[in-house]
Amino acid sequence: MSSTTHRVITKAALLTVLVVLAASCQLERMFPEEVGAGAARLSVRNAVKLISIVKDDANCGMASAAVMQSFRQDGELGQLGSVTWTVENCTVDFGPELVAISEDCNGAKTLARGTLIISATKTVTGILTGNPEKPVIPQAPDAVTFSLSASVRDYELELTDRESVLLMQRADVEVLARVHLAQSLSLGVCSIDTSEVTLDSVSVRDAVYTVDDGEGHVFDVDVPAVDVSGQLGKYDGKENYVEGSITVWDTKVDLNGDHVLDPDYDPAYFQSAFTCREDLKLPYEYVCLPITAKVAEGAAKLTVNNVGNLIGALVDDTSCGFASPDVVEDVEVSGQLGHEGGEALFRIDSPCTLEFPVKTALGRDCQGKTSYAEGTAHVKGTMRLRGRVTGDPAQPIIPTSRDPVELTFDVTFDHFKVSDSESSKSLEILEGSLTGRMAPRMALDASTGACSIATPAVTFSDLAYREGTVALLRKDGNALQLKIDGSSLDAQSGVKDGVENYLEGSIVVDGAPYPIPLEEGSAPILDPEYDGAKFAAGYSCTPNMVPAASEAQCNFRQVIGDGAARLVVQTVGTVAGMVNNDSDCGFEDTFGVLMFPSEVVGDSGDMGSMTWDVEGCTVGADQRVVYSEDCLGGATFVQGHANVNASRTVYGERTTMYLLVDAIEPRDHHDVEITLMDVALDEFVTYQLAAGQSEPIGKLTIHEGTLSALVEPATGARADEPETMDVPTPIARLSQIHLRNARATLEAQGKVFEIAIADTSLSATNGTFDAVTNSINGTIMIDGNAVTIGGPLNPAYNASQFEQSYVCTENLAGPVR
């Protein structure tokens, strides 16, 4: 080859190289399809990220106070509707350097730089709650829609788990997308954001990109237009999907070939990037339990609270409730007077209207929780009280069990609700009605001995809403409206007979029936926050209240036994006094008894004893008579008869009367004993009345029975002969008291109790005797049940007053001490 030819070839080659080198920066333009596909994918990535950027921005984006508080609501409270938040021209400036803006569950970070001016709306459809912080509860996985437009400058997005990067030098971007919601673990509704986003449209106009494909190629590209739609992740039959077109430089590229959005897509890795999100049920799913199920369950639980408080107020209401004069006066009593097994039926036949025009406190428990009522309720119903028939119009029945009360009710509501100071939950019944029954567990009233104090441990039965009831469930500021067309609910608040904090049944809400509890096999819990100890402490400070651990504590036999035992002692004292003083056939019968002692011990002038016996001596009166009077104007009355067999022994100094008749003079306060061996009682009653008193505290009429006892009266010294102790006083020690086979009527405070006394074994002291004061102890068999007796003989005993009652006795030197 000649040198001339060589030079020609060399020049041509050099020219070619120079041409190629000159055109190398536009080499990508030779492959618009490849460039377009890559730029489109990166466009989607950058555009979608704008949604989370504006959603999380707290300066002017969706997370700012101004935007959060200025939402638009379409629809009625508690019903299906929508809420829209709007952002206008929000500038987000990340600066010229990349900054981390988020991190996913895989630890991959998203970095961004540049300036963004964004306008956007976020619309959520669902149940409108009325809560400014959470005004809507989504009802579907595609309930959230974003519409966004942005003008970006030098917007670069980098993912630490991806190699490719897109810098949008300038672009106008519009996005319409649905961020899909997965099921919440705690609520069952779809409310947890995922990264699976349906892109209904992504539009980019007049853009200039710098693309780094991650393989060493960095180049600029003009992008006049992008028009695509797609699916991030998987949803509704599409996965990692894209379609549409992109124009790069002057070439329009069709993206409807393989529809692959991300060639490096790994489904498991994609999903793991968001599955650590709080309260997301795993495995995640878009099967949304209707909020209605949770609403139905909440309504069932709060129904019990509403009913319990309302009927409690009805029981205490004195205008038209069960405590009103009209209801009390019209009570229907059945059963035998004085006996168990009776019933009092209180009726409210015309609706009693309970109105609470403003939030009104119903009561405050021992833990400081206050319950309130608002609205109106019209109530009809009955209250049955079972127990012993008393004959007292004010209290016709004394309860004799822990569960003597059952209430039935029929309630019509008008914007009625109950709330309390510790919870944000309430159920406002806007309109509708309900029927049911409830039975409170009663506690013992220590002041009366009857189980008459209602506790909040209540059994609810057959709580049934009528069709067409409309209510508003509130919790944490949310309000959800529901229509209740029926229910059958049984519940137990607190604990009773092994059942505790219980709710079971069904309720029909918004046309669908729901079992309670919702899930088969779940515990039938009334209050998820229930604490048994706290519940009990809530009423532990109730005045005079003693929890009844058993039915026996409530049978009222202790009260009857206490009263009857004291009056048996009084009967013994009166009978002993009557036969001791009786001059017809008793121990003061000179020619029939006194002159004929059954035993004489000791000679005249010696210390000894004398015993007299009385047989078949009947004392008493057909009509009520005053048996004795005391120094304070009080009197002891007697009616009925006692046929007495008894003996009296007097210890002391032996003397004679008329030189022939044996006699004795007591030298000690305790020198007299009266033994009642066999006393047949017939309609016998004795009682005391203080001055000015018209009715005794209690009286015991013994229709029949046999009495025996040992009575040791304390006698006083004579004023004119102090060494002789034979002046009677009310002080006495009584022992070996037996009343057998007795049928009796106990009357106290207007109440009548018919009782059978099989036997007694009692001892008592009236006043002070051998250092024992005012006491009684032993047992009494009431209606076949042994009642243990112990305590003061006279609960109202006053030592000074007791002495004053007898110090005026004729020829008494002074009180016996």
Image (cartoon, rainbow, N blue to C red):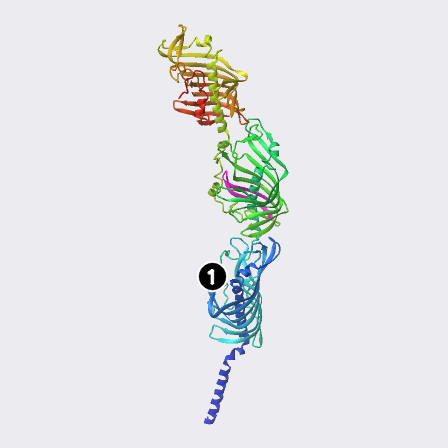
Q: Residue at x 50, y 80 (%)?
A: 24
For this view, does 727 lie left or right of residue 384?
A: left
Q: Is residue 505 magenta?
A: yes
Q: Residues within 10 Å of mark 1 (few under 14, many from 20)?
A: some
Highlighted range, magenta? 487-508
For this view, does 78 lie left or right of residue 5?
A: right
Against 781, is 458 above or below? below
The quarter of the rendered structure image containing the C terminus is: top left
Q: What percent of the width, then of the height, locates residue 212?
A: 49, 73
Q: What percent of the width, then of the height, locates residue 17?
A: 48, 85
Q: Main secondary structure of the magenta part?
A: strand
Q: Is residue 814 magenta?
A: no
For the residue labelled by badge 1, is the local secondary structure a helix, a strand or a loop?
Answer: loop
Against 771, is 440 above or below? below
Quadrant for residue 466, please give it.
top right
The residue singled out by tag 1 in the image is: 105
The reply to whether residue 658 is in sight is yes
Q: What percent of the width, then of the height, locates residue 533?
A: 46, 42
The reply to whether residue 2 is in sight is no
Q: Residue at x 48, y 44 (%)?
A: 531
Against 31, is 548 above or below? above
Q: Amino acid at mark 1?
A: Cys
